[in-house]
């Protein structure tokens, strides 16, 4: 991969990682409700889970889904159902989490990593990156470079959303503001399904 192509890939990785989508909206809500420290496993789960998804798509999973459309449809349905469940949980959250609280918990590392497999935006990003940036002459190396590029920019990008949510904690300590914020985040998260339903 040429330096120009790698730089273009980095820009693509940054833009797709920083723009709103299910992961970033959940991190914003998690930053508000749990703070940055308790959201760290969620951030790492997204970054590592997406890297694994990229490698899987690059090494053949994308071709399997193309060959078996029913599997692709099932994955979309499962992803949509899980996304709606998460949107509902966020929308119904009513209090900032304190350290001693048991009911509300931030997303765990493994849950955030597994969510990448049903996240519509993650699939679009992975398939597009592999389709555009892989080199037929060096397929293995180009897949690894694409995963590396995303690894460089993904964690800092998603951390911004969690940090922004944490910065809003003081403003949203008012229960009424927090209630409407969480409802708005739940609705926006559900709305991220729109491109998938077209």
Image (cartoon, rainbow, N blue to C red):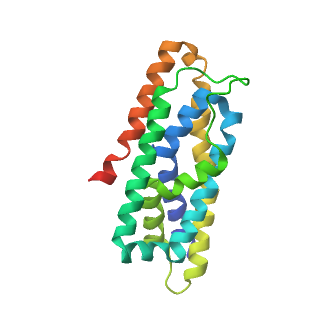
Q: Quadrant of residue 167?
A: top right
What is the x, y in percent for residue 163? Answer: 62, 34
In-front residue for pair 145/23: 23
In the picture, measured across the screen, residue 15 lies left or right of residue 194, that is right
Q: Residue at x 39, y 68 (%)?
A: 71
Kindly tell me whether residue 78 is visible in this rendering. yes
* Residue under the point 58% across and 46% down: 157
Query: Which quadrant of the figure has residue 88?
Result: top left
Q: Give x and y (percent) for residue 97.
A: 64, 24
Quadrant of the image occupied by residue 29: top right
State the count of labels: 0
Asked whether residue 19 is in view, the answer is: no
- The x and y percentages for residue 74 are 38, 61
- Of residue 102 and residue 8, the one placed in the foreground of this image is 102
Q: Which residue is depicted at the point 49% across and 33% down?
A: 89
Work out whether residue 152 or residue 56 is closer to the camera in this orientation and state it: 56
Q: Is residue 163 above or below residue 130?
A: above
- In the image, farthest residue toward the bottom: 137
Task: Locate the N terminus by quadrant.
Answer: bottom right
Q: Nearer the viewer, residue 58 or 19?
A: 58
Pinpoint residue 108: horizontal percent, then vertical percent. Answer: 65, 44
Q: Residue at x 57, y 69 (%)?
A: 55
């Amino acid at each position: 991969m040429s330096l120009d192509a790698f730089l273009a890939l980095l820009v693509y990785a940054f833009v797709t990682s920083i723009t709103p989508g299910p992961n970033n909206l959940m991190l914003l809500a998690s930053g508000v409700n749990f703070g940055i420290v308790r959201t760290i496993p969620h951030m790492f789960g997204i970054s590592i889970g997406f890297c694994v998804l990229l490698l899987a798509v690059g090494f053949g999973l994308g071709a399997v889904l193309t060959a078996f459309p029913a599997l692709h449809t099932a994955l979309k349905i499962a992803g949509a159902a899980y996304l709606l469940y998460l949107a509902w949980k966020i929308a119904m959250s009513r209090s900032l989490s304190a350290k001693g609280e048991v009911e509300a918990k931030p997303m765990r590392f493994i849950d955030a990593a597994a969510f990448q497999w049903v996240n519509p935006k993650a699939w679009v990003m992975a398939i597009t990156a592999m389709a555009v940036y892989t080199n037929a002459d060096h397929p293995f190396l180009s897949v690894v470079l694409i995963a590396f590029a995303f690894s460089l920019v993904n964690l800092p990008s998603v951390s911004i959303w969690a940090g922004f949510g944490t910065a809003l904690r003081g403003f949203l300590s008012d229960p009424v503001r927090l209630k409407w914020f969480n409802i708005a985040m739940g609705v926006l998260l559900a709305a991220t399904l729109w491109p998938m339903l077209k």
